[in-house]
Amino acid sequence: MASLATGNHIIQGEYRVTADPDVALTTLLGSCVAACIWDPLLHVGGMNHFLLPGDNEQQIRDSERFGVHLMELLVNALFRHGASRQRLVAKLFGGANMNSQLADIGSRNAEFAQRFLRNEDIKIVGESLGGDRARKLQFWPATGRARQMLLPKDVAPSEPRKTLVPDLAGSGAVELF
Amino acid sequence: MSFLQQLKVLIVDDTSTSRMLIRDGLEQLGIRNIIHANDGEQALKMMMSTPAHLIISDFNMPKLDGLQLLQAIRSYKPTAATPFIILTGKADATVLARGRALGLNNYLMKPVDMDALKRAIEGVVGKLR
């Protein structure tokens, strides 16, 4: 399931928040999307990295619920660091359609992130989404600075096709008191 | 009016996308009378003016968190017995123990599975259909 990254490299399903001006978070994105969100006044920010798969409507709904959860974890962690909802701004990266056979999974991930941020009134101040090339991303959470490098077309990050969503049934488990 | 049409549910979550997800889930169950609050303070005001029959609240919220809201709801006589379900990111034993001590009826882990939501609601208000 979603987890807090321990290092500065963020892999799929992870997120990290920091106010350390010397820290640059890095990630490698294919169809995945990374949301970089920060509070420009407080100089605290963070990044997540997610892939929402699904071949049919039910799978897509399930994975979007997981996506909402991952976005919430990042935003809640920012609040815990004192960030204010009204000040949050975001940059989005990734969502490439790496493989024509995998249809539009990258676009779907990108649209999901845009929709979420719009719903939450978090302003998107920069984005680089879509295309057919992988991205190497660096993000400095304290300042919001981001730098990306497009990788050559034949380079795809080794993303697990199997996702980190799988255990939804278990995750929603109820314990009756 | 049927039971489901009458059942009024208050959703409390500071993330509007999460509120919409829960609302969708409730509507799929046939529940129509749904109100929301963005945070615990707003939820308390709503419970004092137009009380709901059931509260589904996020745990992690600014101002009042889910347990503080529960505590306030339990200590206000007209709402003291209102069923209360909490949504949490992770099952934290300390949080759940505190919840239990405060009279929490049930909890669900995010991302919320819709079948689990149905079971949780049935667990506190009885079979839905």
Image: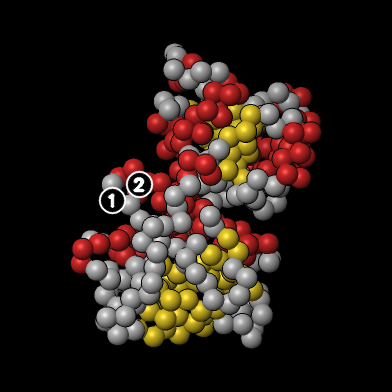
Label 2 crowd (10 A; few <14 / some 14-19 / many >=20): some
Q: On residue A134, which mark appears?
A: none
Q: Please name the residue shown 63% across and 62% down the image.
A: A77
- Residue A108 in the image, given as x and y percentages of width and height: 32, 59
Q: Please name the residue shown 26% across and 75% down the image.
A: A132
Q: CA distance from mark 1 to mark 2?
A: 6 Å
Residue that label 2 marks: A59
User: Is A23 placed above or below A36 here?
Assistant: below
Please state which amino acid type lies under the numbered disc 1.
Asp
Instruction: List the single residue furthest toward the left.
Output: A100
Residue that label 1 marks: A55
Q: Please name the residue shown 49% across and 69% down the image.
A: A11
Q: Pointer 1 and pointer 2: residues touching (CB < 8 Å)?
A: yes
User: Is A61 placed above or below A130 here?
Assistant: above
Please state which amino acid type lies under the numbered disc 2.
Gln
Q: Nearer the viewer, residue A86 or A169?
A: A169
Q: Nearer the viewer, residue A41 or B121?
A: B121
Q: Nearer the viewer, residue B125 or B48?
A: B125
Q: Are marks 1 and 2 on the same chain?
A: yes
Quadrant holding the N terminus of chain B: top left
Quadrant holding the C terminus of chain B: top left
Q: Is residue B9 left or right of residue B69?
A: left
- Residue A146 in the image, given as x and y percentages of width and height: 48, 82
Element type at mark 2: helix
Q: Nearer the viewer, residue A164 or A19?
A: A164
User: Is B2 placed above or below A17 here?
Assistant: above
To which chain does the residue with label 1 belong? A
User: Is A46 placed above or below B21 here?
Assistant: below
To which chain does the residue with label 2 belong? A
Q: Please name the residue shown 28% across and 71% down the image.
A: A98
Whether residue B53 appears in this view of the structure is no
Rendered image coloring scheme: secondary structure
